[in-house]
Image (cartoon, helix red, strand yellow):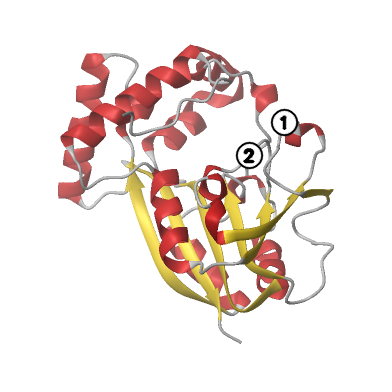
Amino acid sequence: MPYLKIDEGMTPQERRQQAYREKYKRLDPAWDDSIISLAKLFRERAGSGLTVLDAGCGRGNYVLESNQALVKKIVGVDASKEATTGNALAEEIVVADLEKLPFPDSSFDAVTSLWVLEHLRRPDRFFAEAERVLKPGGKLFLVTPHSNSYVLLIKKLVGRRLTRFVLEWLFGRSEADTFRAYYAANTAKDLRRLAKEAGLKELALIENPDPSYLAINGPFFRLALLVQRVARRLGSKIAVMHLIGVFEKTR
């Protein structure tokens, strides 16, 4: 049975990336894909009978899809109606600014945020709003890219025009498929600071590697593994691709 789900909407390049994640999982069974890891944390930490806000819901959410037995109701919110086309998971979808959520205080048992923080100009406002709409004891579950990864460092070096070409070549995606990214909350230090300022307690914060981003073929996959080993020995974060976090409202 495959470790990772293959979505019908995936490009051939994205399917290739999933195949290399499968291969890495066989090489390192203790490792988990970032979304799988967050799904497990949700199962362990969220509770049951939950009303959940999916912030930046897009077309779906594997974390919630794989934990539907724990969830009573899902409300999705996104900045664009078009971005939510095909979302059959959320019972209700609201188009709104994630930095100013249109929900009463203490409305949700959990908030999920998958690949969203990097697109926010003021992530501090989102953290404050997430804390506000959570019930006491409610939890924020998030995953976002690490801004010091070699993927993002290369992106900064090559510039916007070449980045468009790389997106198409590596992942079969045009820049129109993605929202602009600001990376204003994309280190562990950033997340800890924002959570503390918002009054959220850290329950888990994982810096997760993923060599599949460089794996366009076998030699490049081996190169990615080498970079990862060297980075670990040097204490560098360049091979950390993602941040996975769980934060709790305590007040």
Q: Position of residue 47 (x, y in %)?
A: 51, 69
Q: Are marks 2 and 1 in contact (CB under 8 Å)?
A: yes
User: In which quadrant is the N terminus drawn?
Assistant: top left
Taking 81 as reference, is 36 left or right? left
Q: Amino acid at mark 2?
A: Gly
Q: Amino acid at mark 1?
A: Gly
Vertical order, 230 against 191 (above or below): above
Q: Which residue is mark 2?
A: 60
Instruction: Give me the residue at 67% from left, 43% from top.
Output: 89
Residue 227 visible, this angle: no
Q: CA distance from mark 2 to mark 1?
A: 8 Å
Q: Position of residue 65 (x, y in %)?
A: 56, 45
Taking 125 as reference, is 207 left or right? left
Instruction: Give me the residue at 42% from left, 59% from top.
Output: 41
Q: Position of residue 236 (x, y in %)?
A: 27, 49
- In the image, 88 versus 202, the foreground residue is 88
Choose the circle earlier in sequence order: 2 or 1. Answer: 2
Answer few, some or many: residues within 10 Å of disc 2's Cα (few below 14, many 20 plus, some between 14 and 19): many
Q: Classify residue 45 by image quadrant.
A: bottom left
Q: Which circle marks residue 122 in the picture?
A: none
Q: Which residue is mark 1?
A: 86
Q: Secondary structure at mark 2?
A: loop
Taking 185 as reference, is 58 left or right? right
User: In which quadrant is the C terminus drawn?
Assistant: bottom right
Instruction: Give me the residue at 18% from left, 40% from top.
Output: 28
Taking 14 as reference, is 182 left or right? right
Residue 179 visible, this angle: yes
Report the number of numbered marks. Answer: 2
Answer few, some or many: residues within 10 Å of disc 1's Cα (few below 14, many 20 plus, some between 14 and 19): few
- In the image, 7 versus 240, the foreground residue is 7
